[in-house]
Amino acid sequence: MDYQQHFVNALERLKGEARYRSFARIERKAGAFPTATWHRPEGPRDIVVWCSNDYLGMGQHPDVVRAMVETAQATGVGAGGTRNISGTSRAVVELETELADLHGKDAALVFTSGYVSNQTGISTIARLMPGCVILSDALNHNSMIEGVRQSGAEKLIFRHNDLAHLEELLQGIAPERPKLIVFESVYSMDGDVSPIGAICDLAERYGAMTYLDEVHAVGMYGARGGGIAERDGVMGRVDVIEGTLGKAFGVLGGYVAGSTEVVDAIRGYAPGFIFTTALPPPVAAAASASVRHLKRSTAEREAQARQVARTKAALADAGIPVLPGTTHIVPVIVGDAARCKAASDRLLEKHGIYIQPINYPTVPRGTERLRITPTPCHDDRLIAQLTRALVETWSALGLRLEAARAAAE
Ligand SMILES: *Cc1c(COP(=O)(O)O)cnc(C)c1O
């Protein structure tokens, strides 16, 4: 039996569909973000990263770095086991207290990633409610889809952010069956926002529980960085809020926050929590420092919003086809997998600008794009440089420029 051939074939399929992934080797530099070193085969080169999910540059914040280094020196680096087997550190307990407070919930539970928190969190919640039907937004992240699938529960997909469709589906479910609505606040590819309050209205009317992924919003929206639900004044109406510590908080890990009972039940039943080594104390301490900082400081959020608005305006003025939106995510549509990859390659090789291509299956075919994420660290000079580079790339590849627009909003 030639097992090897299966993998050769699988790789050929990826390459045939222009879906083979090649990663640029990037070395971030603390204090110099968004500048980084690109380790090319021909040798290192300084570049500017324009597609990081370290949305606020917290990965290099001195308080966050210090918390990680000092905790590592004090406790060592690893957790030493699962939460049950000596992995419940003071740092992780403090982090959970910080996160419960961030979302105004009784309790929070930390996982090794946002992916794991969705996968094991959603599946555990649904399995604990016999006969549960899950209502899931059509554009939910893969980690939520996996959570829904692993629950084994019946699932109904509602059209993206479509309240009428969600209500129609809710009406069709027997009133006595438990219902769980799973959705996101900021959808990361288009940068659009869900109507959380209106979804909670429907949940209350039809007796459904709500589970909200705020991964692309925590740290960035709301007076204390509690996310879109905090900004919209509806945090208290959402049953479970899930977030990541790896994006705006700049570290690593994921969590759910909710009532004492829901969180305690997930703690006792979720395999993705029980059977894996806990978050290391240095990581937990760094995440706590980041969450704590962003509760008090609005400077990063304000600077991000300002630089995002300037980026959108500069690109729209230059005729670059920016997808309109109200969040920090700036999608520039190319509409073709090969040219999207070519645009990304040219930006990196010719202009020293790193924006990875986003192709099918992450986004629908025909909407292939560059996903730009300006941070507080992308100053006006970098925005001007990006704009020039995109215009040069668009003309070199024969991509269409739009008539200049006043702003992308
Ligand atoms: C990135 C992402 C996750 C996973 O979070 P990680 O901490 O990176 O594992 C979950 N949900 C959404 C919507 C995401 O984009």
Image: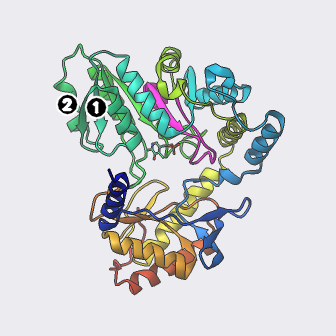
Say which quarter of the image contains residue 141.
top left
Residues at badges 1 and 2 in contact (C-beta under 8 Å)?
yes
Seen as rendered, the residue at the extreme left is 172
Q: Nearer the viewer, mark 1 or mark 2?
A: 1
Residue 21, x across and y down, in percent: 43, 62
Q: Residue at x 21, y 37 (%)?
A: 164
* Residue identified by numbered label 1: 135
| Three-letter code, disc 1 | Leu
Tell me the magenta residue range: 233-256
Give the distance between the C-alpha atoms of the residues marked 1 and 2, in whole angstroms.
8 Å
| Three-letter code, disc 2 | Leu
Seen as rendered, the residue at the extreme front is 1
Residue 237, x across and y down, in percent: 43, 26
Rate crowding at label 1 as few (under 14), some (14 to 19) or many (20 or more) other CA atoms within 10 Å. many
Residue 327, x across and y down, in percent: 46, 53
Q: Which mark is first along the chain, 2 or 1?
A: 1
Front-lying residue, 239 or 350: 350
The response on whether ligand 1 sits within 8 Å of label 1 is no
Residue 135 shown left or right of residue 183 in the figure: left
* Residue identified by numbered label 2: 169
